[in-house]
Image: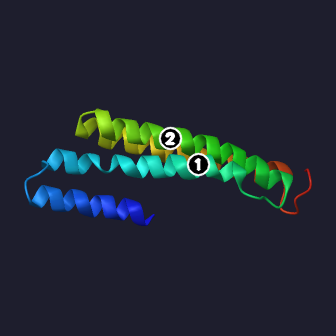
Amino acid sequence: MKKEILVALAARYAREHGYIDQETTQRVVAMNGLVIAYYGNRAPKAIAPSAIARQVARFSGWVLALSGLVYAGFWAFAPLPLAMTIGTGGLAAGVIMVIGYCIGLWTKVGNDGRAA
C-alpha cells in the first residue's frame, strides 16, 4: 500500500516541476483499480472458516478483480469524464453485486448458518 502512495506523491512532484501534465497526474488514479484487482485476486486464496465464507470469497474475488480492471482500464485509456462515470460506476456495481450476493446467501442460509 505504501508503494501506491509513493507513486502518487512522485506524480505530484513531477507535475509541480513540469515533467508531466495535469491529465497524466489524474491517470495515476488508474493504479487504484489495479490495487483493487490485486486484492480481488488474493481474496479466494485466503483461509476461510467455512464453506459459505469460501463461496463468498470466490465470488467477491472474481467480481472485485474484474471491476478493478474495468476501473483501471477506463482511467488509463478513456477520456476523463467517461472514466469518471463508467469506471467508478463499474467499481460501484461490483461492490453492490458482492453486497447483494452476501444478502442473498444470508437469506438462503439463515442467521444460524444452516440451510433454511
Q: Residue at x 31, y 38 (%)?
A: 76
Query: Could you tell me which secondary element the residue under label 1 belongs to?
Result: helix
Residue 10 appears in the figure: yes
- The answer to the question of whether label 2 and label 1 lie on touching residues, with beta carbons closer than 8 A, is yes
Give the residue pinned by disc 2.
Answer: 67
Looking at the rendered image, the disc whose residue lies closer to the viewer, 2 or 1, is: 1
Seen in the picture, residue 5 relative to 59 is either above or below; the reply is: below
Q: Which mark is residue 30?
A: none
Q: Residue at x 35, y 64 (%)?
A: 5
The quadrant of the picture occupied by the N terminus is bottom left
Q: Position of residue 16 (x, y in %)?
A: 10, 60
Query: Could you tell me which secondary element the residue under label 2 belongs to?
Result: helix
40 displayed left or right of 111: left
Residue pushed farthest left? 18
Q: Which mark is residue 40?
A: 1
27 displayed left or right of 101: left
Q: Earlier in the sequence, mark 2 or mark 1?
A: 1
